[in-house]
Amino acid sequence: MKTEFLTRRSSARARFLAVGALLALTSLSVNVAAQQQLSKRYPAAKNVRIELRNISGTITVESWNKNEIRLTATIESKKAQVLPRQTEQSLVVDVMSDNRGRGDVGDINFKLQVPVNSYIDLETRSGNINVANIRSDLVRAHVSTEGDIILTNIVASQVVAQNVIGDIFFDGEFSSGGNYEFKSNKGNITIRIPGNSAFRLEAASPARRIALNDFWNNKLKTHDGRKYVGDVGDGRSSVSIINFSGQITFMRR
């Protein structure tokens, strides 16, 4: 009798677990089915301009060896519209305008593969922005609320990276005569550049958390550790960094 009872109990538990697994799989299938997938390709000049205005979601941009743009997007809500528009010199994706008055359209995650010399201009209200392997005149990444910005292997004459909450990481080179601006209210800002970089620096951190490391020299003036101003090398480019409550760190590539 005891053996029969244990057998029935084990059988009932197995059925319960099987039903639970089925419900979880069904829920996952419904969520996946609710997502929309967008994939498009566009012919492009070598120095095409990419403009993307998102509401929420991750944006990833990387270069490839083709005079072509490949855009893929995962769209969470069926209410959301993504309507890319191409002109002779640019590709524009404006999720904010395309979905005005539609309420919450959820996350839209973008991945773009672009020519290496593309101008990059990205913005989202929330979500991470990742840009890699770009050599051009402009790389701009702006998160108006919360999200990390990671810029890897960037050579551009103008770089702007701004967020409110989140880390900013720049790995690349400062071009002669270039302008570079990094700003965060709450998060760490890390700059990784070659040891022979030359630039005019203005770095401010009210929290006194500035680590210049190998790039410190006697020409830099400080104001109680809250701000450093001066030339590194011959100051051939201009670098401005403001971090209100996080760390500013320079690293040698």
Image: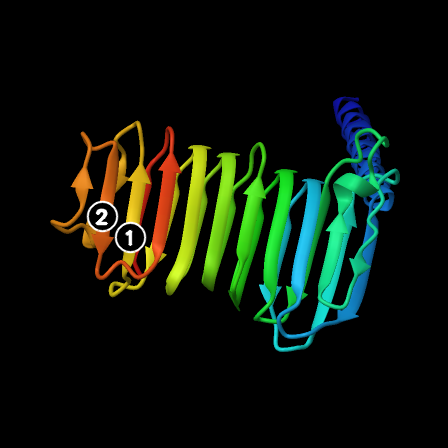
| Nearer to me, 72 or 101 | 101
Colour pattern of the rendering: rainbow
| Nearer to me, 168 or 93 | 93
Residue 28: x %, y % from top left: 79, 40
Q: Amino acid at mark 2?
A: Gly
Q: Secondary structure at mark 2?
A: strand
Q: CA distance from mark 1 to mark 2?
A: 6 Å
User: Which residue does the image show at 71% across and 63% down from the upper left?
Assistant: 90
| 212, above or below 205, in the image | below
The residue lying furthest to the left in this view is: 218
Q: Are marks 1 and 2 in contact (CB under 8 Å)?
A: yes
Mark closer to the chain start, 1 or 2: 1
Q: Is residue 130 visible?
A: yes
Residue 247: x %, y % from top left: 33, 37
Q: Name the residue tied to disc 2.
A: 230
Q: Amino acid at mark 1?
A: Arg
Residue 27: x %, y % from top left: 82, 36
- Say which mark, if any, is on residue 76: none
- Say which mark, if any, is on residue 200: 1
| 86, above or below 78, in the image | below
Q: Secondary structure at mark 1?
A: strand
User: Which residue does the image show at 20% across and 32% down from the upper left?
Assistant: 223
Q: Quadrant of the N terminus?
A: top right
